[in-house]
Image (cartoon, grey):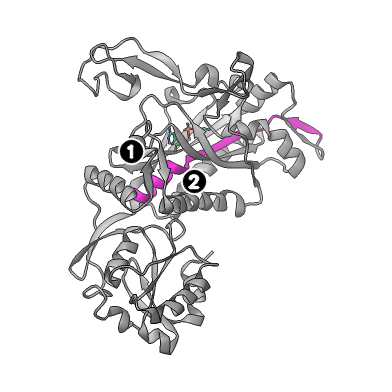
Amino acid sequence: MTSEAATGTDAAPAEGRAPAEGRAPGAGDLMERIVGLCKRRGFIFPSAEIYGGFRSTYDYGPLGVNMLRNVKGAWWRSMVQLRDDVVGLDAAILSPPKIWEASGHLANFTDPLVDCRQCHSRWRADKIDGVCPNCGSTDFTDARPFNLMFKTHAGPIEDEGAVAYLRPETAQGMFVNFANVLQTTRKKPPFGIAQVGKSFRNEITPQNFVFRTREFEQMEMEYFVPPEEGMKWYRYWVDERYRWYRELGIAEEKLRIRPHESDELSHYSTATSDVEFLFPWGWDELEGIAYRTDFDLRAHSAASGERLEYFDQATGERYVPHVVEPAAGATRTMMAFLLAAYEEDEVGAEPRTVLRLHWRLSPYQVAVLPLSKKQTLEPLAREVLGLLQPHFMCDYDTTQSIGRRYRRQDEVGTPWCVTVDFDSLDDRAVTVRDRDSTEQVRVPIDRLVAELGDRMPT
Ligand code: GAP
């Protein structure tokens, strides 16, 4: 039933009627609106803003940190928790040059850098089509390779022996721990090692908000397989990863798989496909699924002198596994989920902004809203909040009119609002309001956790 009280004088006009069909704004506008919303509502702030910002770095605010954790959690759930063939790892970010020598990053992890002779700005040659975005000149220096790794020193002496790198990908942590994981878990190929964490690249031109930044988070998994099964698992992971984005709400028309041309392949890969999203500026990469063969294990084995292979005791067979790697960006993916979820529609002839995020990704799953600020509702509203908090991430908001508070929750993607009104004091029931349909139903408080749980099946 619809709650009288929650749809009464304090509610937005005609709240509860199905909203008018939503639409996403045009591409340029959409980007601007997402950046604005992220700042205004506490998803993403420019880093060190009070000092004028710092070189395209970003901080994740109270809502952003929830959402980013949810993106990473959804990935971990699908890649590790729901599988018995993948285990987790959390390797160090600071790493010795030997790792990056062996992996080929010291020699090959470069972008082509050019200087504009007119205005002296520096650009990544493959991103500017021969025209300086700053002054329009076409007069550049020859391209030279620029290594993207951040170099630092570990310890108090800044000499060559103390050189360390911030990892530019999480992947190598999995390769150098291959033998440790094999011994401790007794896994047998096919099996995977998954990791989520920060990576650092000294990008020549960071751009498009958090799409390309110098500090970002990755979600990567190295799947070790018998060599003859490499292509089979490569195709399997391309399908699996595409499915993950679809299940979390990205529409089919905004998602595609793009196999790499042979001249695009990384130095370690024989086949790669990207999962691409239709960003406001066009199709661009969300994730790469690469068939890395035995490149990394062989390289680390040769450089370290350690045997990095699998010995099958049953058959007496010994081999270096091949690797298929789904490598996604957590921060970039969060931005894609925000862009895909953004809509503007009308509810009761009032415009609203709504993020139609999957409930697994929303910063809050539930908002508890006492209908009025009057003290009489506070104890029951807090009791309801206390009941829900162990199960769901909850917001609690007592400011402004109920209609305004619904709009505020819609704008940050909260799928369900629970309104405690004056009737609740007598009937111990509350109104549950659905973000997408704006439909409201009355639910007894002692059924509330189960009712919301049904809407968020594990
Ligand atoms: N281990 C393989 C690897 O790192 P990658 O394609 O360079 O492959 C994987 O990176 C994913 O990491 C990309 O698809 C992207 O989502 C994310 N990523 C890479 N560089 C990034 C950057 N500068 N800023 C944000 N995300 C980035």
What residue does disc 1 label? 283
**Residue range of the region highlighted in magenta in the rendering:** 316-339
Q: Position of residue 395 (x, y in %)?
A: 42, 64
Label 1: how many Cα within 10 Å (few below 14, some 14–19, many 20+):
some
Question: What's the residue at 75%, 26% (across, down)?
Answer: 307
Q: Position of residue 274 (x, y in %)?
A: 44, 37
Question: What's the residue at 42%, 89% (across, down)?
Answer: 426
Question: What's the residue at 72%, 43% (across, down)?
Answer: 187
The answer, for residue 442, to whether it is visible in the render is no
| Quadrant into which the N terminus falls | bottom left
Q: Is residue 327 above or below residue 134?
A: below
The answer, for residue 191, to whether it is visible in the render is yes
Q: Which numbered dot is residue 241?
A: 2
- How far apart in space, not on screen, are marks 1 and 2 (Cα)? 17 Å
Q: Is residue 88 above or below residue 204?
A: below
Label 2: how many Cα within 10 Å (few below 14, some 14–19, many 20+):
many
Q: Which numbered dot is residue 113?
A: none
Q: Position of residue 47 (x, y in %)?
A: 39, 39
Left or right, 364 with respect to 355, comes to right
